[in-house]
């Protein structure tokens, strides 16, 4: 597994608009984006004791999360992902799932997973049986991604974060979600060995808080007291 540097900042809407304009001048839009953005729907897993949530809140340096994800309402391409964090470094392991396989995992029909040829699917099966990992919450948001080739840099701006609360029917594109973090925008910066100065300057925000926000945590414990809008 190759780990990459990762920084996450909670920023304001005004910050996001300013950074978007800077990045448009120096970086490339992700070719997978539609009109510069895409909609992400994820289903996160956790134990009955909320191990992933508690470790995030406690600031545990070494942790991992499992999720299933698809983009722009397109269920023909569904990814199972394991996200691993070690301090300020992160990596992601992925496997493809069919629509039927994803639905069976949501429904708790998982015996087929132990016979899969994919190691990540078998690992999730092991976690679901031994650690009682199960689907916990739907997380929806809008993402604007930017790419800068030197340093293999990826900057993403996330907003319009919504939660399914106790509903885990994430393959239902009509599933009702509600705002989970009104007014909050998240900037994530990822790179390999070095972060080019031109990108460092573009994302510079002296007042931004580093590593203080988790979309998973926000959707498990929604903050709904602030105003929000689509940008």
Image: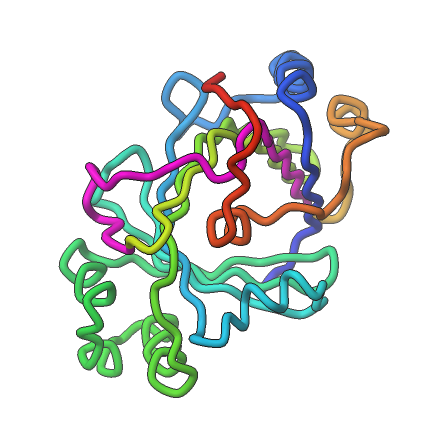
Looking at the picture, tell me which residue is in the foreground, 151 or 129: 129
69 with respect to 142 (left or right): left
Image quadrant where residue 179 sits:
top left
168 or 116, which is in the foreground? 168
x, y percent for residue 85:
63, 62
Taking the view exactly as shown, the residue that stands out farthest to the bottom is 130
In depth, the one of 214 and 62 nearer the eye is 214
118 with respect to 50 (left or right): left
Q: Give residue 207's position: percent from left, percent from top.
A: 83, 30
198 and 213: which is toward the camera: 213
Residue drawn 50% across and 70% down?
50
196 inside magenta stretch: no
| Residue 109 image position (x, y, % from top left) | 17, 74
In the rendered image, the vertical position of residue 193 relative to residue 106, given as above or below:
above
Q: Does 54 sit left or right of 45 as displayed?
A: right
The image quarter in which residue 91 lies? bottom right
Q: Residue at x 68, y 42 (%)?
A: 8
Residue 94 position by quadrant? bottom left
Q: Residue 190: within the magenta?
A: yes
Residue ranking furthest to the front: 225
The x, y position of residue 209, in whole percent, is 77, 39
Residue 46, compared with residue 7, is above or below; it is below
Q: Main secondary structure of the magenta part?
A: loop
Magenta highlight range: 168-191
Which residue sits at x=77%, y=33%?
208
Residue at (23, 53) in percent of width and height: 169
């Amino acid at each position: 597994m190759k780990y990459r540097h990762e920084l996450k900042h909670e920023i304001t809407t005004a910050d996001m608009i300013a950074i978007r304009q800077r990045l448009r001048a120096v970086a490339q839009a992700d070719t997978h984006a539609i009109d510069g953005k895409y909609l992400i729907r994820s289903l996160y897993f956790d134990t009955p004791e909320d191990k992933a949530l508690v470790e995030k809140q406690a600031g545990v340096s070494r942790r991992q999360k499992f999720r299933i994800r698809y983009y722009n309402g397109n269920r023909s391409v569904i990814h199972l992902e394991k996200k691993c964090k070690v301090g300020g470094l992160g990596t992601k392991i992925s496997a493809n799932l069919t629509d039927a396989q994803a639905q069976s995992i949501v429904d708790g029909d998982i015996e087929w997973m132990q016979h899969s040829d994919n190691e990540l699917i078998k690992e999730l099966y092991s976690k679901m049986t031994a650690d009682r990992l199960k689907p916990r919450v739907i997380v929806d948001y809008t993402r604007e991604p930017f790419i800068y080739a030197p340093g293999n840099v990826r900057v993403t701006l996330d907003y319009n974060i919504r939660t399914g609360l106790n509903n885990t029917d994430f393959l239902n594109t009509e599933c009702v979600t509600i705002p989970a973090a009104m007014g909050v925008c998240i900037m994530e910066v990822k790179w390999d060995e070095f972060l080019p100065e031109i990108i460092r300057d573009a994302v510079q925000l002296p007042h931004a808080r580093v590593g203080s926000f988790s979309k998973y945590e926000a959707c498990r414990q929604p903050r709904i007291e602030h105003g929000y809008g689509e940008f």
